[in-house]
Amino acid sequence: MIQGLLTRPLTDEVVKPFVESAKGTLHSDGPNFDTVNFSGDIACFGVLRGTGEVMAQANNFYYFDHAYMFGNRHLPSKIFKERIYRLTKNYQHIREIDRLKAKDKQRIQKYKEHIDLKNWNVNGDYVLVCDISEHAKKFYDRPNWLDETVKELKKHTKREIRVRSKGAKTSFKSELKKAHAVVSFQSTVCVDALVAGVPSFCDKVSMGIPVSLDDLSLIEDPLYPADREQWIDSLLANQFTMTEIKNGTAWEKVK
């Protein structure tokens, strides 16, 4: 039985209907969650307020976070007019290309007509490095990821290395226009980059790993994956509108 971890009203609105659709139990005694069987299955949103510690011990965990595409944080999607979230089992991101059933393909059609998949940019100039959040640095124990990454890149390229800080105000789309490659840790920026035709380098924990390289020594020889569209479809199939979370579609997909 799934145990839902309730941590704050905004994210509880996501976890609660999912757990109810799976006929599970709800627990609001965080951050210690003394009423939770840590060796059982849990569902949560994010890694804060005690959820990360429970995830580390759980038999299985169902993890919600912000959508891969078309999301608007905790506001309704500007296109689809309701909130959208990603959902994965036992990882914070899906890290493989999922085999989709016919009903998955049908469900994601609403997204695909809004995606403009660009040709590969093979004449980029600079390497764009996207820093990670303070939460990610702490959770993955990578406090010096940015400095280590830039240092490693300088060993293998003479290109300009541009750093985009977390929360930068400049348009990410504008920074992609002349990028040779984008380097990230586990951020969804790699999704935007790959859709825009810019090759990606990322960590193995990233959703981008099926269509990216993780070896920075290959920065001058990036990957232009032939299965980019299948990967995007896989991401879309693992995100859900609030309607799909409430009516059991999300649970049926990940159980």
Image: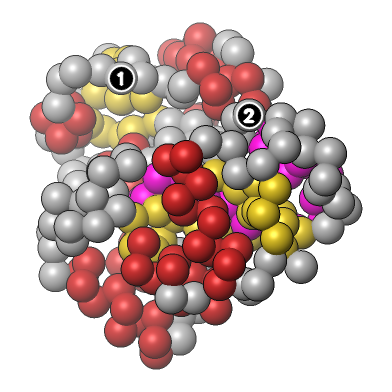
Residue occupying the point 56% across, 72% down: 21
Magenta span of residues: 50-69
162 on left or right of 33: left
Give the residue type that dot 1 points to. Gly
Q: Quadrant of the N terminus?
A: bottom right
Instruction: Answer yes or no: is residue 107 visible.
Output: yes
**Kind of element beneath mark 1:** loop
Give the vertical position of 124 relative to 103 (above or below): above
Q: Which residue is mark 2?
A: 49
- Foreground residue, 59 or 93? 59
Q: Residue 30: percent from the left, percent from the top?
A: 70, 34
Where does residue 162 sit, x and y in percent of width and height?
Answer: 29, 16
* Residue 105 inside the magenta-drawn segment: no
**Of callouts 2 and 1, the N-terminal one:** 2
Contact flag, marks 2 and 1 (Cβ < 8 Å): no
The tag on residue 167 is 1
